[in-house]
Image: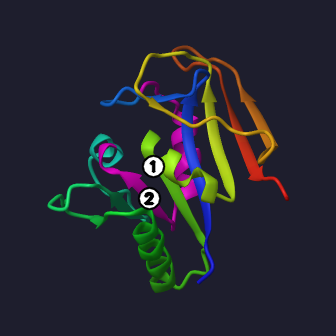
Amino acid sequence: MNTKLVAVVAMASNRVIGDGDDLLWHLPGDLKRVKQLTMGCPLIMGRKTWDSIGRPLPGRASIVLTRDKNWQAEGAIVVHSLDEALHKGAAWLAEQGTGETRQILFGGGQIYKMGLALCDAIEMTEVDLAPIGPAMFPEIDAGHWHETERTQVPADGDVPAHRFLRYEKAAN
């Protein structure tokens, strides 16, 4: 099965995606968007991202990439390399029989760094905040990616201003 890899990420304006423990913001519209973007797809994530979610997300496979050969969790498909994750994701999609071909690179920072070059698209939420945190999204090289969609969302009460962006890999 020929699949497409799509990075789905929420990041601050300084590229921070996490503090290692919790979500750095609460964006109800983003949660709905992520569900819509990822439903029926395998999510490839690191163990820390799995830990922050705490459970498998319904309607999606949770493929957890970890160096720990003994780690396991109920509902997680455990893998130890990105190549293995992509093979397991393709197999899961084939089993579903829905015709879906997207696999989702779901974080965190090390997973994005490892797999971004393999992605066909990036679905990004960029939040107008600049928190401090160790987990960062890699720089987007304008020579390799072009923005194809942008939707601005103004601040509303406790919800900071943010935008939904779509990048597609530039043709060579």
> Would you say 9 lies left or right of 121 here?
left
Q: Quadrant of the N terminus?
A: bottom right
For the record, the magenta segment spans 24-48
Name the residue at 21% across, 55% down.
68
Q: Position of residue 19 (x, y in %)?
A: 37, 26
Amino acid type of the residue tagged 2 in the rendering: Ile
Label 2: state its secondary structure. Answer: strand
Q: Nearer the viewer, residue 145 or 154?
A: 145
Mark 2 is surrounded, within 10 Å at the Cα level, by few (under 14), some (14 to 19) or many (20 or more) other residues, namely many
Residue 111 disc label: 1
Q: Label 1 to label 2, Cα distance in Å? A: 8 Å
Is 104 drawn above or below residue 93 in the view shown? above
Report if residue 30 lies within the magenta region: yes
Q: Specify the quadrant of the image occupied by residue 14.
A: top right
Q: Position of residue 50 (x, y in %)?
A: 32, 49
Q: Where does label 2 land, which residue?
A: 44
> Would you say 156 lies left or right of 135 here?
right
Q: Quadrant of the C terminus?
A: bottom right
Whether residue 93 is visible: yes
